[in-house]
Amino acid sequence: MAFSFKDFPAERLYKISKKIVDLAFFMGGYRVKYYEAERCNYVFPSGKSCFNEHTLSPSIHCPVCGGSGVIYREPVEIRAIAIDTQDRPQKRIEGIQFIDNLRLVVPAEVPVKLIKLESSGKMFYIRDRFDIYSSKDDVWHTVFVSSEPRDVWLAGILYKSFTVNSSRLSVREATGNIEINIDGLEEEIKSIVSNSQISRNSQTSQNTENENLEEIIKNILGK
């Protein structure tokens, strides 16, 4: 039987396409926790605000935001499609820093945003946060919004698309090919220190015995 659009009115086609997209999000999407960000509004007992609106500087002594200037609401669990993009390596003294770049697609009702505050040529960003979970149910990426969300239509359904990123410092050497294994390093150091202490104690004991033997020989010879 040949397919005919006449047999599928617009409303029915919309329902079918919505089911397809929903299924794609369920099967190909990630479990994500969305944290909506807002500026820290804590006020110290002295009356001083954590966030200085003129310098765009939060207080490092703030007990609420810890000096970040940003606080997050309770997370909301959603499904999202995450498209991995190429990492951008940056060499640093401590190792190689990687900027993880992803593009997320989320349902339109998620109020994702990127707030930019500007004062006297200075910029301060308030970025929503996402924890992306792997199939093993552990956090695969913690990322922050890095671009303004834009509307995208998938099969006639509205979604939001935007980029997110996070920076991580690799323990790899400058070549980027060797991983430094620090597992058991503490125990190994303790063992070295302990053996060294035993060796020093043994050497001290041996020196004492030699000195005593020399003293006995001197007494026997009368020297």
Image (spheres, helix red, strand yellow):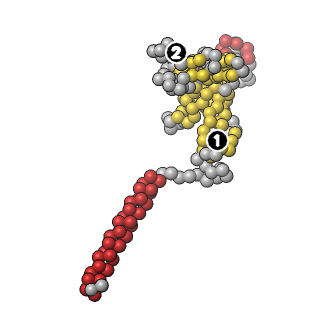
Task: Name the residue furthest front.
Answer: 223
Residue at horizontal 28%, vertical 87%? Answer: 221
Outermost left residue: 220
Residue matched to label 1: 97
**The residue under label 1 is which amino acid type?**
Gln
**Inter-mark Cα distance, 2 to 1:** 36 Å
- Residue 95, percent from left and from top: 62, 46
**Front in this rendered view, residue 50 or 26:** 50
Please give left or right for residue 135 compared with residue 145 in the image.
left
Q: Position of residue 198 (x, y in %)?
A: 36, 64
* Residue name at image x 61 percent, y 49 percent: 172
Dot 2 corresponds to which residue?
48
Q: Residue at x 27, y 86 (%)?
A: 222
Q: Position of residue 223 (x, y in %)?
A: 30, 84
Mark linked to residue 12: none
Amino acid type shown at disc 2: Lys
Mark 2 element type? loop
For residue 5, which quarter of the picture?
top right
Dot 1 alpha-carbon crowd within 10 angstroms: few under 14, some 14 to 19, many 20 or more:
some
